[in-house]
Amino acid sequence: MQITLTITDSPAAEEVALIGQNLAAYNDADVGPSGRRVLVVTVRDEAGALRAGISGYTAWGWLYVQWLWVDERLRGQGMAGRLLTAAEDEARARGCQSAWIDTFNPVAEKAYTRQGYEVFGELPDFPVGRSRKFLQKRLVASD
């Protein structure tokens, strides 16, 4: 078999999807189906404009919060905690036992630790001058 290695910053959406599908198929065969489901929580104002939200997914009994954003006008009011609580409640309803999130923002890290998350890993200088922290939280009591 002759192969060609290509590097691009503008891949075809079909190629990206196929990579994900093939990896998912491999992982499903290796450790069992992930049961991956998207999980989104949004906050809108009276006009319907998006003011805060979480985007992530549940898989293999875990909630992964990929993005958490709060509009500047709502910051400092516990909105991140309310979003996380809503996402965690839905994750529990889906059978998840734990959650994880990562950040390089010290303010966000404090919000997550107030919510009960604990740091389990760190990448120094990611980005330079900051550390990316990985945090986890148990969603159900251990037996």
Image (tube, rainbow, N blue to C red):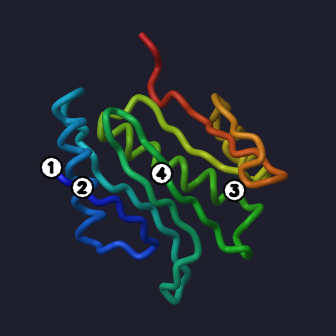
Dot 1: what SS? Answer: loop
Q: Do the residues labelled 4 and 2 touch (CB within 8 Å)?
A: no
| Residue named by callout 4 | 86
Vertical placement of 27 versus 126: above or below? above
Vertical placement of 143 versus 132: above or below? above
First reached walking from the N terminus: tag 4 or tag 2: 2
Vertical placement of 82 versus 122: above or below? below
Q: How far apart are marks 1 and 2 (CA)?
A: 6 Å
First reached walking from the N terminus: tag 1 or tag 3: 1
Q: Distance between the residues labelled 1 and 3?
A: 57 Å
Q: Residue 1 carries which label?
A: 1
Name the foreground residue: 61 vs 73.
61
Vertical placement of 113 versus 130: above or below? above
Give the quadrant of the C terminus. Answer: top left
Q: Distance between the residues labelled 2 and 3?
A: 52 Å
Q: Residue 21: x and y, percent? A: 21, 53
Label 4 crowd bin: few (<14), some (14–19), many (20+), radius 10 Å:
some
First reached walking from the N terminus: tag 4 or tag 3: 3
Label 1 crowd bin: few (<14), some (14–19), many (20+), radius 10 Å:
few
| Amino acid type at mark 1 | Met
| Amino acid type at mark 3 | Gly
| Amino acid type at mark 4 | Ala
